[in-house]
Structures are given as structure tokens and as C-alpha cells.
Image (cartoon, grey):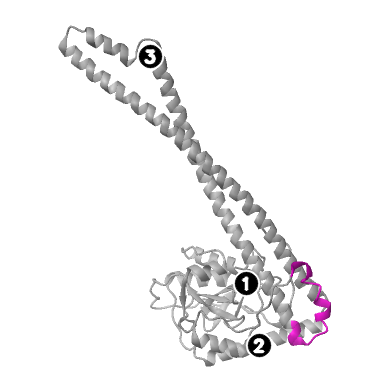
């Protein structure tokens, strides 16, 4: 589910994974999550290591931040759903209480009529004493209707009381769940901040030359992984998108250059799954908010069958996502401190791909949107991070 990402790749393992199955994860180094309080402590020692070791450590820290971000995003989405449910319950409760009030008014009128001698019983006495059979018959029918109406009024009152009680109990439960989710969201927000502080601490120990060296090494690894992917034949065919997929691509391309901010869903900034979910929502097809739910709920497709608009999922825990635009390229919100950009498909360890609209036919003709200049990021992007929370 996360929202920050960098582009580490194990070239040979990636090539093998793509050829075999879209659901198989790349055999990239699998970092063990560090304790939030110590994530930055090892940075000074790491600064003295080899460029490859430094890059691996930095990638691990970014991935931990990404995983924490998507967990936060999942809780935020659930809290949003619970708030909508609470508002719906509150509206239903108001309606039920109005119905209950009307029922009580009707019951009060019943009691007053009986007290004042205008009850069904007094009408029944008049019926017994009547000398006119026709009048007696008419009065009997009226009495039956009145009695039936009063029985219905009592039933409505009883039903309204039961409904109001049920809604009130359910509303209290939803409120309790909201409070639990809000507390969990705060805890997860703090976890993201801790992970990002770990990244910041490590970056602070590195010189500009060292950072440029890391960026170059990362680009070299991405280029090798992309070449292995192309050699496997996974990028050899070009397919047009569906109509909705084309809309999603155009939306994503329009966001190029906007900053990455964790937890953001636009319009001014995005995290990785914020970008992909909003692209498809703009195309008229809402999809899950987080990368992990996108991977879990949407239809999986082989990487060699990708068409523009499909979502490419990265890392073993599905903690990063990008939107495929064709020609072996994706649009992604990569990581904190970066901007939405075009990247090679193999810019991260590949897990697989999913298609939000598997039943939609491809367009007969398709003209890809023009990419803005400097749509892709390279070594000039550098490494930076912002820890300002958005949730």
C-alpha cells in the first residue's frame, strides 16, 4: 500500500520473474524492517560503506517508508468509509425518531379519545342501542376501520421504537470504530514519519558527490533490468488501451511534475497509489485506494500482455504501484522528495500487473498522449525527502 519508492533492481532475478509469471516477485534483496527508533542510527556507519551497500540501505529505508505509508493509506480509506457510514446512520436515525414522534402523537390521541368517551368501546355501545339496522351496519364498518387504524398506529409506534433503538446502537458502534481507526491512523502516521526521518538521517551523512554516485548506480541497475526485461520478450508487443484505460493514461500524464507527498490523492500532489487510484477514478472506474488492495482485488495480467492503463505492482508486499503507458514505460509518483514522472517499467523490483477493466475491449485506434519535456527523472533528481505529514 505505500507511497514512497526507489528504484532498486536485481537484474537477473527480475528477468526470470517476468518470463515465468506475473504474480512471482523479483528476487531482489528482501530487507528486514528496521525498528523506527533506530532506522537512522546506522546511517553514519553506512556512509563509509561501498556505493552498492549504501544504495541497498537507502532503498531499504525508502521501502520501509513506502510500506508504512500504504498501511496509513489503508486505515485512512477505512476511516473515510466509516465516516460515510456514520453520516448515513445519523440521517436514518433522524428519520426514525421523527416517525417515533409521530407514532407517540397518534398514541396520545388514542388515549385522549378513550378518556373523553370517544373510544371504540363507546361507539360499540351506540351500535348495540341503535334501532336502525342500516345505520348499525354502517357504524359497525366505521368502527372496524377505526379499530384497524388504531392497531396499525400501535404497530407503527412499536416498530419505530425498535428501529430507533437499533439505529442508535449501530451508530454508537460505528462511532467506537471511528475512534479506534483514528487512533490507529495517528500511530501509523507517526510510523511513516519515523521511517522518513531514518531516510533523512542517512542522506544527511552523504556528500553531494556520494549522492550523485548513488543516483548513477541506481540508473545503471534500472537500465540493466529494463534491458533484461526487453530481452525476455515481455515488451515486444504494443496493444491499445481500452477507452477508460486511455483516459487514465491521459490523466496520469497531466500530473507529471507534481510533487510526491505521502498520503496525497491530488490535485496538487500524489503518492504512488493516490496517483493510480485517481487516474482510474477520473476515467469513471473507481478502484481501491492502496497498492496492496489494487493488487489483491483487481484482475492480474501477465507482464507480456500489458496494455496502457494497466497497473504495475512492485516489491514482494505490493507496496508500490505505477501506471503503464506503453513502450515499456510507466508514470509513477516514485518517493518522498521526488515528482510524478515517466520511468522504465523495471524501475523497481517487479511483482506483477493488474487490469482495472479486463472486460473492456481495446480501442481500434489510439494516439498516445504527448509527454512533456523532461518527463523522466534521472540523476539530476537526486535524493531528498520531506517528512511533512498530510494525513
Image height of 38 relative to 90, above or below: below
Q: Quadrant of the C terminus?
A: bottom right
Closer to the observer: label 3 or label 2? 3
Q: Estimate the x, y position of residue 290 in percent, counting from the top left.
A: 57, 66
Question: Which residue, given by chain and number where applicable, does mark 3 sit on?
Answer: 114
Q: Residues within 10 Å of mark 1 (few under 14, many from 20)?
A: many
Task: Judge whether residue 365 is colored magenta.
Answer: no
Residue found 44% across the figure and 27% down from its top: 102
Q: Which residue is mark 1?
A: 333
Query: Is 170 or 355 nearer to us in this picture?
Result: 170
Residue 95 shows up from this direction: no
Rate crowding at label 3 as few (under 14), some (14 to 19) or many (20 or more) other CA atoms within 10 Å. Answer: few
Chain part drawn in magenta:
35-54
Label 3 or label 1, whichever comes before in sequence order: 3
Local SS, label 1: loop
Q: Secondary structure at mark 2?
A: helix
Q: Earlier in the sequence, mark 2 or mark 1?
A: 2
Q: Is residue 145 above or below residue 222?
A: above
Amino acid at each position: 500500500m505505500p507511497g514512497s519508492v526507489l528504484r532498486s533492481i536485481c537484474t537477473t532475478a527480475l528477468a526470470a520473474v517476468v518470463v515465468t509469471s506475473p504474480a512471482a516477485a523479483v528476487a531482489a534483496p528482501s530487507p528486514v524492517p528496521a525498528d523506527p527508533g533506530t532506522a537512522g542510527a546506522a546511517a553514519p556507519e553506512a556512509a563509509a560503506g561501498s556505493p552498492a551497500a549504501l544504495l541497498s540501505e537507502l532503498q531499504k529505508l525508502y521501502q520501509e517508508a513506502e510500506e508504512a505509508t500504504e498501511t496509513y493509506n489503508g486505515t485512512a480509506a477505512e476511516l473515510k468509509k466509516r465516516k460515510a457510514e456514520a453520516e448515513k446512520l445519523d440521517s436514518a436515525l433522524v428519520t426514525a425518531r421523527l416517525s417515533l414522534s409521530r407514532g407517540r402523537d397518534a398514541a396520545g390521541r388514542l388515549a385522549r379519545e378513550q378518556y373523553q368517551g370517544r373510544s371504540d368501546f363507546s361507539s360499540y355501545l351506540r351500535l348495540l342501542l341503535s334501532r336502525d339496522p342500516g345505520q348499525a351496519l354502517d357504524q359497525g364498518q366505521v368502527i372496524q376501520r377505526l379499530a384497524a387504524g388504531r392497531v396499525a398506529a400501535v404497530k407503527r409506534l412499536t416498530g419505530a421504537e425498535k428501529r430507533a433503538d437499533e439505529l442508535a446502537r449501530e451508530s454508537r458502534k460505528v462511532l467506537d470504530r471511528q475512534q479506534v481507526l483514528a487512533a490507529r491512523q495517528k500511530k501509523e502516521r507517526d510510523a511513516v514519519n519515523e521511517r522518513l526521518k531514518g531516510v533523512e538521517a542517512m542522506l544527511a551523512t552523504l556528500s553531494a558527490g556520494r549522492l550523485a554516485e548513488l543516483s548513477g548506480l541506481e540508473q545503471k541497475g534500472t537500465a540493466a533490468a529494463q534491458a533484461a526485461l526487453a530481452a525476455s520478450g515481455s515488451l515486444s508487443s504494443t496493444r491499445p488501451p481500452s477507452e477508460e484505460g486511455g483516459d487514465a493514461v491521459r490523466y496520469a500524464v497531466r500530473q507529471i511534475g507534481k510533487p510526491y507527498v505521502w498520503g496525497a490523492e491530488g490535485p496538487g500532489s500524489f503518492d504512488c497509489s493516490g496517483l493510480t487510484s485517481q487516474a482510474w477514478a477520473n476515467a469513471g472506474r473507481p478502484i481501491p485506494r492502496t497498492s496492496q488492495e489494487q493488487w489483491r482485488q483487481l484482475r492480474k495480467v501477465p507482464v507480456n500482455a500489458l496494455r496502457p492503463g494497466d497497473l504495475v505492482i512492485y516489491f514482494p508486499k505490493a507496496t508500490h504501484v505505477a501506471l503503464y503507458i506503453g513502450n515499456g514505460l510507466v508514470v509513477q509518483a516514485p518517493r518522498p522528495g521526488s515528482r510524478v514522472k515517466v520511468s522504465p517499467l523495471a524501475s523497481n523490483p517487479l511483482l506483477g500487473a493488474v487490469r482495472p477493466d479486463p472486460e473492456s475491449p481495446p480501442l481500434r485506434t489510439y494516439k498516445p498522449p504527448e509527454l512533456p519535456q523532461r518527463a523522466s527523472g534521472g540523476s539530476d533528481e537526486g535524493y531528498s525527502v520531506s517528512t511533512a505529514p498530510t494525513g
